[in-house]
Amino acid sequence: MSTENRAATPEPAPTEAMTLEVETVTGTRSFVASDIDPMLPAGVLAKTLSAELALPQNVPWMLRDSASASFLENERAIGEQVESGAKVTLTPRTHLG
């Protein structure tokens, strides 16, 4: 039996459907989105949620974790970035600079 140190491996994304509290950046609209596949990329989810809210589709949308105020990575699975029940803000993606 080896006692060598091993690097910690990241936790796998959950496999059960998620629920998220979603709010628009202006705070004028909010709802609970349920039955979300935790393996769905956050960017795909942002686009889907923006379409459901009838927000302009010529604007790129992204999600921000309301608890940490950090933007979620579009390519990473939503379940790797926030837990079920989290509150997220749907925000237009802007490139300043």
Image (cartoon, grey):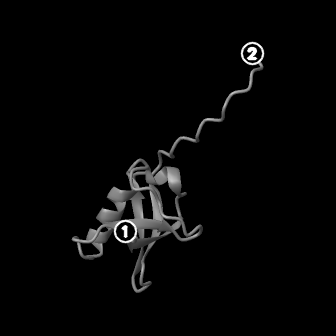
Circle 2 sits on which residue? 2
Mark 2 or mark 1, which is nearer the start of the sequence? Answer: 2
Q: Residue furthest front?
A: 97
User: In the current view of this chain or complex, which residue is farthest to the left?
Assistant: 58
Q: Position of residue 85 (x, y in %)?
A: 53, 64
In this rendered view, identify the residue nearer to me: 75 or 24: 75
Q: Are marks 1 and 2 in contact (CB under 8 Å)?
A: no
- Residue found at x 66% / y 32%: 7
**Left or right: where does residue 69 sit relative to residue 23?**
right
Q: Secondary structure at mark 1?
A: loop
CA neighbours of label 2 inside 10 A, class few (<14), some (14 to 19), many (20+): few
Say which quarter of the image contains residue 54: bottom left
- Considering every residue shown, the one lying at the far top of the view is 1
Secondary structure type for disc 2: loop
Q: Where residue 13 sits in the image (x, y, percent)?
A: 50, 45
Residue 82, horizontal then vertical, whole percent: 53, 58
Q: Quadrant of residue 29?
A: bottom left
Residue 4: numbered disc: none
Please name the residue that numbered disc 1 is placed on: 95
- Identify residue type, mark 2: Ser
Which residue ends up furthest to the bottom in the rendered image? Answer: 28
Q: Is residue 39 left or right of residue 54?
A: right
- Give percent across and percent down for residue 24: 40, 78
Number of numbered discs visible in the structure rendering: 2
| Residue nearest the observer in this picture, 53 or 57 | 57
- The C terminus is located in which quarter? bottom left
Picture layout, residue 5 above or below residue 14:
above
Left-right relation of 60 to 82:
left
Residue drawn where x is 74% and y is 26% of the image? 5
Image quarter hosting the N terminus: top right
Three-letter amino acid code at disc 1?
His
